[in-house]
Amino acid sequence: MRRLPAWCWFLVVLAGCAGPMRLGVTVPQRELQRRLETRFPFKTRVLLFDVNLSSPVLTLEPASERVGLSLALKAGMAGVEYQGQVAMDSGIAYQAKSGALVLVAPRLLRFQLDEVPEVLCRQVGKLVGPLVAAYLDSLPVYQLKEGQSRRRLKGLRIEKDQVRAELGF
């Protein structure tokens, strides 16, 4: 019977180790939604306006590799309160230092206040949009488990109803 050369054994061992080197983590949309809800309401002041954002709704947009965010808006000034909506989208990334999936590069898509002329909404949106984007940027939406967070990101995919991260060493 013939013996295999040493380099063949090395390949066999290497192939056996390749499987556990990668780990797939799947996070359902409903879990991201649940965790995002814990980060709201968000309250801030812009010039004379008190702004309150609440009731986030997260949608996954596989075609653009981004997530959509819709937020209920209340803006008040001098005892008068307006209600409306803010629509944003954001990338999602893995932050190795914290072991979390975080929102990145959020963009304001729409800012709307009921009963306020569109021209004024655009102006207020230019003030509020960057504040909301700053709050959302790097906001954790999912914390990986202890053993998972020590790995490096190999790939991240936004699918129809889940986010899939592939981690490895």
Image (tube, rainbow, N blue to C red):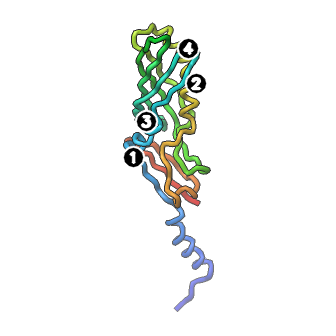
Gap in angstroms between the C-alphas marked 2 and 3: 22 Å
Q: Position of residue 91 (x, y in %)?
A: 52, 37
Gap in angstroms between the C-alphas marked 4 and 1: 39 Å
Q: Dot 1 corresponds to which residue? A: 28
Callout 3: helix, strand or loop? strand
Q: Earlier in the sequence, mark 4 or mark 1?
A: 1
- Which numbered dot is residue 15? none
Dot 4 amino acid type: Leu
Q: Position of residue 33 (x, y in %)?
A: 40, 40
Looking at the rendered image, the disc whose residue lies closer to the viewer, 2 or 1, is 2
Give the quarter of the image for residue 3: bottom right
Q: Earlier in the sequence, mark 4 or mark 2?
A: 4
Q: CB atoms at circles 4 and 1 under 8 Å apart?
A: no
Callout 4: helix, strand or loop? loop
Residue found at the very far bottom of the displayed protein:
1
Callout 1: helix, strand or loop? strand
Q: Dot 2 corresponds to which residue? A: 130
Callout 2: helix, strand or loop? helix
Gap in angstroms between the C-alphas marked 4 and 2: 16 Å
Gap in angstroms between the C-alphas marked 3 and 1: 13 Å
Left or right relative to 154: residue 85: left
